[in-house]
Image (spheres, grey):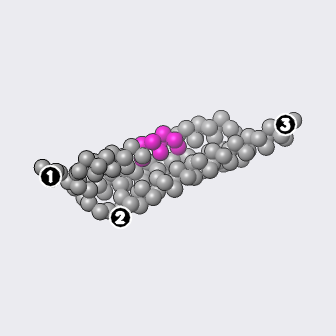
Amino acid sequence: MENTEAVERDDLAMVSMGVILHAGNAREAIFKAVDQAAQGKFEEADNLMNEANFALIEAHRAQTSTLQKEAEGIEIPYSSLFGHAQDHVMTVKTEYNLVKEIIKLYKRLEEKENE
């Protein structure tokens, strides 16, 4: 028996915009965090990175729920907007991982300066 369910294009657009919104919020927090770390404000930097992580989790959840529907046989229309949203999440996740390492370096630099 064939599954005739499908996700409406407007619904996919809304999901896509939600993914982009959450990823954009994460990106903003990430770059604020690295700025705080550069100023030696590590607690603030860590809080902002936690905020970014939660926003990325929300973006990933929305993306994953759509992909799960497709895996269940529900038709997902092609959407360049959804593709862009997925790309946005992937890019921001990479930035998140890089900035985590940069913050570690700032912390080590401060430790060395204080020796």
Say which quadrant the C terminus sits in: top right
- The three-letter amino acid code for the residue at tag 3 is Asn
- Above-or-below relation of 109 to 76: above
For the residue pair 8 and 43, the one nearer the viewer reads as 8
- The three-letter amino acid code for the residue at tag 2 is Ser
Query: Residues under labels 2 and 3: Cα distance?
Result: 51 Å
Can you identify the residue that label 2 sits on? 80
The residue located at (20%, 54%) in the rendering is: 6
Can you identify the residue that label 1 sits on? 2
Of mark 2 and mark 1, the one earlier in the sequence is: 1
Query: Residues under labels 2 and 1: Cα distance?
Result: 26 Å
Residue 36 visible in the picture: yes
- The three-letter amino acid code for the residue at tag 1 is Glu
The residue located at (74%, 40%) in the rendering is: 107
Q: Which mark is residue 92?
A: none
The residue located at (83%, 40%) in the rendering is: 112
Label 2 sits on a secondary structure element that is helix
Residue 27 visible in the picture: no
Residue 113: % across, % down: 84, 41
For the residue pair 12 and 6, the one nearer the viewer reads as 6
Relative to 9, 30 lies left or right: right
Q: Is residue 55 magenta?
A: yes
Query: Residues under labels 3 and 1: Cα distance?
Result: 67 Å
Per the rendered image, the range of residues in magenta is: 52-59
Relative to 98, 11 lies left or right: left
Residue 101: % across, % down: 66, 46
- Above-or-below relation of 75 to 48: below
Label 1 sits on a secondary structure element that is loop
Can you identify the residue that label 3 sits on? 114
Callout 1: few (<14), some (14-19), or many (20+) C-alpha neighbours within 10 Å?
few
